[in-house]
Amino acid sequence: MSKKKWYRLDNAAVAFPAIFNKIYTPQYRLSATLKDNIDKDILDQAIADLRKRFPTFFVSLKNGLFWHYLEELKKPLLSKLDYAYPLTIKSSSDLKKSCIQILYYENRIAVEVFHAVSDGDGGLIFFRNLVSRYLELKYNETIKKENGIYNLDDEPTLEEIEDAFPKCKAESRYVRPNNRAFHYTGEFLPGTKVIRVTGIMDSNLVKEKAHEYEVSVTAFLDALLIECLQEIQEKKVRFKKQRIIGVGVPYDLRRIFHINSLRNFALKTDITIDPKLPKYSFKELCLELQRQIKSETSSQKVAGAVSQNLFLQNLNFLKISPLSLKDIIINIGFNIIGEKNESITLSNIGVIPHDDIWDKYVDSVHFLISTGIYHHDIASSITYNGKLYLSFIRKLKNAELERLFFSKLVSLGIPVEIQASE
């Protein structure tokens, strides 16, 4: 009997098993709504066909003496009926069985990924290949093996499965400022329930409006979010006690360093404003956030930030600490830094490149990320076939933030169709 393969956690993944608990699972979800109902048997065959090409996704989470690690699955991974609300909390026993779930319901395929496996951009490649393979099997189509769609008979490359972070570190370390931010909160929904609200809009209209303010779509959406949060803080908090407002912006290192990893290879930076300074006009706010994004995602600062993360991981006392103590130390570090220096995260995964065959069978695509320990309302967006799908997931009863956000988009001349799950 062949020995099972195992994988060390990459530098970004180390923290996720440590901060995971009964009320928080760091994970994300990609889903496609097709024109026809899903055939489970064909979906299971598509999953099986991906296993050889994407081995780092077919893994479970294991505990070693000093570190968590990923181990290849013993059994075939089968799809399950998607009967609950999205991104339900996973238990440790769930992750010991599999770190990903592939779900279906009527005409929808969904993939939920524990963040220790890969970031959203890596997960998107897996998801696109899964849906493409399903379409090939279901409709006897052939999708071109290009632009992130792989030949499933090929072996994975070393670059795809190894930890890419050490390849791009700098000689010196860059430590980002750490300031406690305003957090939007309120009365919680019962248990671990969450509500999803998605706004669907014409992506070209959004892009044109962003260019009107001379910024990227990401900076434009971040500016709208910060403006909404500033208005909420002004209503709830006295001026002297107001805190900075920050948006966490994840960004893909593959585009910066041209390394085709399928593991985690992303970082997150915080873009902020101080509400105690003179108020920005909306255009000034857009330009300031664009400046911060450009500065914080320069290759020099990114390499320095990677070096800082590797330095922390390789501290001697941390390396020799047993796993139980290491998890406590990482948890303390997360509570000190973690989400406290940002008010919300907006993860914009961008435009999905796709074959024309997708247009025949796939109506829409959604991208969701889980709420955090301090993030009770969180946002994510994806663009497919001329539509931008921007989703909020919240564990709060109050929908004030998303109402305000989508109202502002409409006031700027961008019609928004709202979908919600209760």
Image (cartoon, helix red, strand yellow):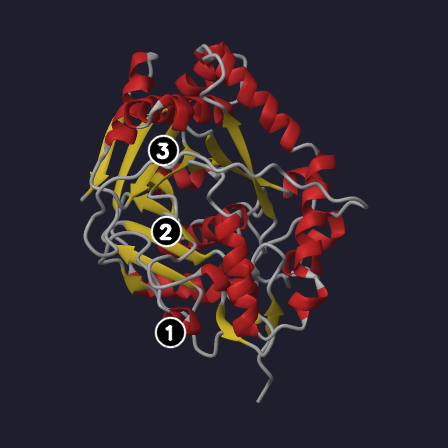
The span from disc 2 to disc 3 (Cα, nearest Å) is: 26 Å
Image-based side of 363 in relation to 240, left or right: left
Sequence-wise first label, 2 or 3: 2
The residue positioned farthest toward the bottom in the image shown: 1
Question: Dot 3 corresponds to which residue?
Answer: 389
Sequence-wise first label, 2 or 1: 1
Comparing labels 3 and 1, the label whose residue is closer to the camera: 1
User: Of helix, strand and loop, which one carries label 2?
Assistant: helix
Q: Amino acid at mark 1?
A: Ser
Image-based side of 392 in relation to 223, left or right: left
Q: Could you say which disc has been placed on residue 93 in the image?
A: 1
Q: Is residue 311 visible?
A: yes
Question: Dot 2 corresponds to which residue?
Answer: 139
- Hey, which quadrant is residue 314 in on the image? bottom right
Q: Residue at x 36, y 51 (%)?
A: 139
Note whether 286 is above or below 75 in the view shown. above
